[in-house]
Amino acid sequence: MPADQILTIFGASGDLTERKLIPALYALKQRGLLPENFAVLGTGRTKMTDEEFRKKIESKGEEYDNDFLAMLHYMPLDPLDPENYYKLREKLRKLDHNMRVKGNYIFYLATPPLLYETVAEGLAAAGLNHNEAEGGFKKLVIEKPFGYSLETAKKLNQVLQLYFDESQLYRIDHYLGKETAQNILVFRFANGIFEPLWNRNYIDHIQITSAESIGVENRGGYYDTAGALRDMVQNHLLELVALAAMEPPAGFDADSIRNETVKVFQSIKPLSSNDIKNNVIRGQYIASKIKGEEIAAYRSEKGVDPASRTETFVALKFFIDNWRWGGIPFFIRTGKRLPTRVTEIVVRFKNTPHRLFRSIFDDESGPNQLIIRIQPDEGILLRFALKEPGAGYTVKNASLNFHYSSLGEQRLPEAYERLIYDCMMGDSTLYTRGDALEACWKFIDPILNAWKDDPTVKMFGYPAGTWGPEEADGLMNSNGQHWRYPCKNLTDDDNFCEL
Ligand SMILES: NC(=O)c1ccc[n+]([C@@H]2O[C@H](COP(=O)([O-])OP(=O)(O)OC[C@H]3O[C@@H](n4cnc5c(N)ncnc54)[C@H](OP(=O)(O)O)[C@@H]3O)[C@@H](O)[C@H]2O)c1
């Protein structure tokens, strides 16, 4: 059980708090995983009493019980006014006095990122950044984006580390909170059969797809300043690469695992300007019709610049220059307005050295693939070759297919549940460390700079509801490599979904 503590949320009047954080806390309470003495102190510029805050949270549909609602408190506070951090300290002292949480405080920054540095400084000025000798801990949780470039990420790290020790910082990547992402490590390091094959000798390539079928919804303004590379690749998808590619850690503690993660990022071969032209494909969705419905182009979305050069799709090929992966390509593809919502890792094993049988595979990717489905319909699919019944030796694809849902009653905890619980427990394994963050930006930064500075780097249009620009297929077309398509283009008549 976590120690008694208070969780202060900055930006508690916002979307993340009511949609993710409070439901996650409630789920923890239902599972008996909240500390005995626990309070949430929401803060924001919006003026609300405790009662009004509880009502606002309650109005969001979920049925929270009274015990839980009584844990919720609120304090109106403008984070830009330095005086307010002293008032916050007083408020925390009062709550602490009643609840005896002994100075154990988590500060969760659910505000726009432009406030991260200000809040960290304000907390430090009021002395709310020091772990206390008699056991009171202070932790700072921050949400992505962690900077917009290598330079801004470094500056953010510097400021945060000026006021807080790295061990007090919890940078959330909610992909790491997903049960299936954590399972990659168990799958790799608890099974004797796969790990011996998990290297350049037996694996042809690894591809990661993270597709969304929706567009930018009402987040056009934010998205237009970010784009797919910053929003998805720099953080979530590179974290998945690390889980798939890392060496076995010395132990299963936060430091051992995060040491291996950072080594993967440091081993990614930097992309030259030619690589960026040839091995990184960016795209933007254009208008199309799906099942009779007109879908607007990205540039016509609310909040988006009509001449925007922001990518809603990116596909890239890169290498990890180390002993295990030398020469083996990794592919990442992500985008909005693709045919379906799916995140999966496909490990494509090499073919047999000699083809003995006539084969009719139902895609062109060869027989042996391991597909780790991160979301939705979490599961693992192993594809292998099987003799078609009847005369002769014709070979077909067959699948072993595990769905988490078949575990029955057991519900998969939401990512935020796991991450908040880990933070309360002081386990930072699933949080991004500062050095890993900078290593990821080091890889991403040259791509962003080339896109900004070099007008010859192309932006391809793709009709909404398709798998992105055709040029993304060109990344793969050597050596019989292909993207896996769990669904056809929605603009085709007969679309289907597998797994
Ligand atoms: N929503 C999500 O699903 C999601 C997912 C991943 C990451 N994030 C990240 O999580 C953070 C919070 O997300 P959110 O969607 O909850 O954001 P949000 O609704 O835009 O903002 C949260 C709160 O911050 C306060 N705020 C906004 N602008 C401010 C300003 N200029 N000065 C002071 N306070 C300001 C507002 O409260 P007051 O007006 O009461 O002060 C607002 O309710 C962001 O960094 C976001 O990037 C969100």
Image (cartoon, grey):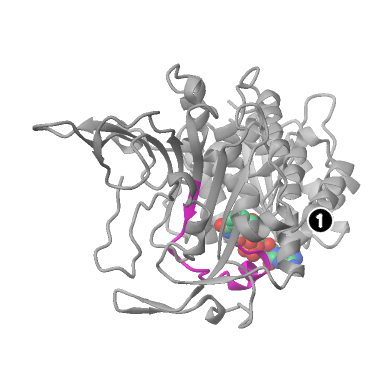
Measured as percent of width and height from the top left, residue 242 is found at: 61, 36
- Position of 296 relative to 284 (above/below): below
Is 127 left, or right, of 153 in this rendering? right
Could you say which is closer to the camera, residue 135 or residue 360? 360
For image coordinates 69% across by 71% down, the residue present is 456
For image coordinates 83% across by 42% down, the residue present is 128
- Ligand 1, seen in the image, is in the quarter at bottom right
- Position of 58 relative to 430 (above/below): below
Is 79 left, or right, of 496 in this rendering? right
Q: Mark 1 points at which residue?
A: 152
Q: Which type of secondary structure does the marked residue at label 1 adopt?
A: helix
* Residues shaded magenta: 208-227
Is residue 472 inside the magenta stretch?
no
Amino acid type, mark 1? Thr
Image quarter where the N terminus lies is top right
Measured as percent of width and height from the top left, residue 61 is found at: 42, 58
Could you say which is closer to the camera, residue 47 or residue 423? 423
Residue most toward the left?
390
Which picture quadrant has residue 12? bottom right
Could you say which is closer to the camera, residue 58 or residue 266? 266
